[in-house]
Image (cartoon, grey):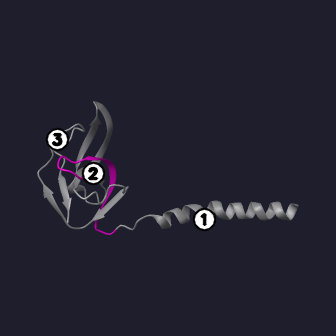
Amino acid sequence: MRNRSDYLGKTLRVLLCAAPAMLLGCAQPCNGNIECTVLYAKPGAHGGRNIYVDVLNKPGLGTKKTLLWEGKEFGTFAHVAIINDPGNKYASNRKICFTAYRQGAAATGGELNEEGIPQLTIN
């Protein structure tokens, strides 16, 4: 009986150590020079989605902003930008990576205190 419990203990340790490595292996690779963390997504005015992101490695692309939702603070982020996603291509992503983009006029108003946030369309 002791050999069996030793075997089970070793197997459990191997699985616990290997699990994080397997999960990291499942993450989507970053295909682009600009990397963003998705903060929030909401339906766009003309279909698709507006995806609020915190730009990680190109600080000049976003603006420091405290986002509000229904009058309550959602959070303060260093480099916020809004990605227009008309085809819902990035609807379920936690991270978005890209290289080519077009920058539109900064957002105005909105329910998340969107004033002055750069709007991007990924090419």
Q: CA distance from mark 3 to mark 1?
A: 45 Å
Q: Residue at x 31, y 63 (%)?
A: 97
Q: Residue at x 62, y 62 (%)?
A: 17
**Which residue corresponds to mark 1?**
18
Q: CA distance from mark 3 to mark 2?
A: 15 Å
- Nearer the observer, 17 or 90: 90
Residue 58 in picture, x, y percent from top left: 25, 59
Nearer mark to the viewer, of 3 and 2: 2
The range drawn in magenta is: 31-48
When asked about the image quadrant of residue 60, the answer is bottom left
- Nearer the observer, 97 or 63: 97
Residue 102 among those drawn in magenta: no
Give left or right: position of 86 versus 22.
left
Residue 123 in picture, x, y percent from top left: 20, 66
* Amino acid found under the numbered disc labelled 1: Ala
Q: Residue at x 80, y 62 (%)?
A: 6
Nearer mark to the viewer, of 2 and 1: 2
* Amino acid found under the numbered disc labelled 2: Ile
Q: Earlier in the sequence, mark 3 or mark 2?
A: 2
